[in-house]
Amino acid sequence: MSPDHPPGLDLDRLRALLERERPGLLGGPLSGRLIEGGRSNLTYTVTDGAATWVVRRPPLGHVLATAHDMRREHRVISALHPTSVPVPRPVLLCEDEEVLGAPFYVMEYVEGTPYRTAGQLVPLGPERTRKAVLNLVDTLVELHAVDPAEVGLEDFGRPEGFLDRQLRRWGKQLDASRNRELAGIDELHAALGRALPASPAPAVVHGDYRLDNALISDDESVRAVLDWEMSTLGDPLTDLGLLVMYSSPLGMPDSPVSTTAEAPGHPAPAELIERYAARSGRDVTAVSWYTAFAWFKLAVILEGIHYRYTLGQTVGAGFDRIGDLVPVFIEHGLTTLQEG
């Protein structure tokens, strides 16, 4: 399969569909390539030589349930595009599996850089790094200020009992990948359950809000927020807790899981929390619970990866060290919950 015809992307069928559904959009034959990004769904760039678009589809050999993700992702960016939340312009949703073998959607290509590691931020310098991260907080405030009913997302999730359901869901995920003793993980799960905060009014929640799911422009503004596959209607402070977690130094050089926290100029978690509180007007006194929950959730995700690695189902660089990270995340979670 040539680079211009990546697996999972039939360019002839895609072109026929676009010419039929969006006449005048294309100026010539299409070429495409697979790009990195997204926890599970595949992302491609497609160009006719003059303009560029992005195609998102489930993984090859996907299970049926993920077909729903495409509709959800397309729906949320379509709803948010007219608002002040920066998202790519949606072009088309196709649920006919005859075209690419799975449902998919097409959106405009947005220029910008997703910064995944502290090392990638270093060339920006401390001032620009600081500005980019604070802009990310401001964009989160914009997202949580959107009235779901006003943009047609009032039925996008079930906000009642949101935190309780999340906690139970990740507890079940943990049980599904138990194959070793993990000191403190059950203690953390139980402590989170005992201290469940009362949720504020529901908002559109991204679900995986961090710097490398945003495209940052040369002036440090957020050009677009990407990867909406975990978005829902729920407790907005879960997004803040996750962002705070990813902004906390791990204290582990060469960690296979990157946070950008150690980049020079990166604002400390306390500053991000204060900025969010000041700009959103929300009560953030329970933010340590949400941050501890983010540590727990990531510990469970990493343990699942480690479990699949021990079964020989996951190959690649760094996977052999994922298991060592899990106790670090558990410890951070317990400390955050105890010390606030």
Image (spheres, rainbow, N blue to C red):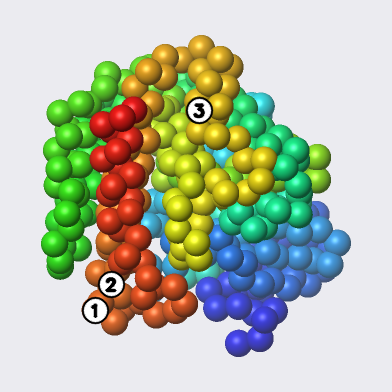
Single out the mark in the foreground, 2 or 3.
3
Tell me which residue sits at (17%, 34%) in the image.
191
- The three-letter code of the residue at mark 1 reads Leu
Badge 3 density bin: few <14, some 14–19, many ≥20, Cα 10 Å: few
The label on residue 270 is: 3
Q: CA distance from mark 2 to mark 3?
A: 35 Å
Tell me which residue sits at (35%, 60%) in the image.
325
Q: Quadrant of residue 14?
A: bottom right
The quarter of the image holding the C terminus is top left
The local secondary structure at tag 3 comes to helix
Q: CA distance from mark 1 to mark 2?
A: 5 Å
Say left or right for 324 vs 113.
left
Q: Which residue is mark 2?
A: 308
Tell me which residue sits at (44%, 79%) in the image.
316
Say left or right for 209 vs 52.
left
Residue 58 visible in the picture: no
N-terminal of the pair, mark 2 or mark 3, is 3
Badge 1 density bin: few <14, some 14–19, many ≥20, Cα 10 Å: few
Tell me which residue sits at (44%, 73%) in the image.
318
- The three-letter code of the residue at mark 2 reads Arg
**Viewer-proximal residue among 50 and 314:** 314
The local secondary structure at tag 2 comes to helix
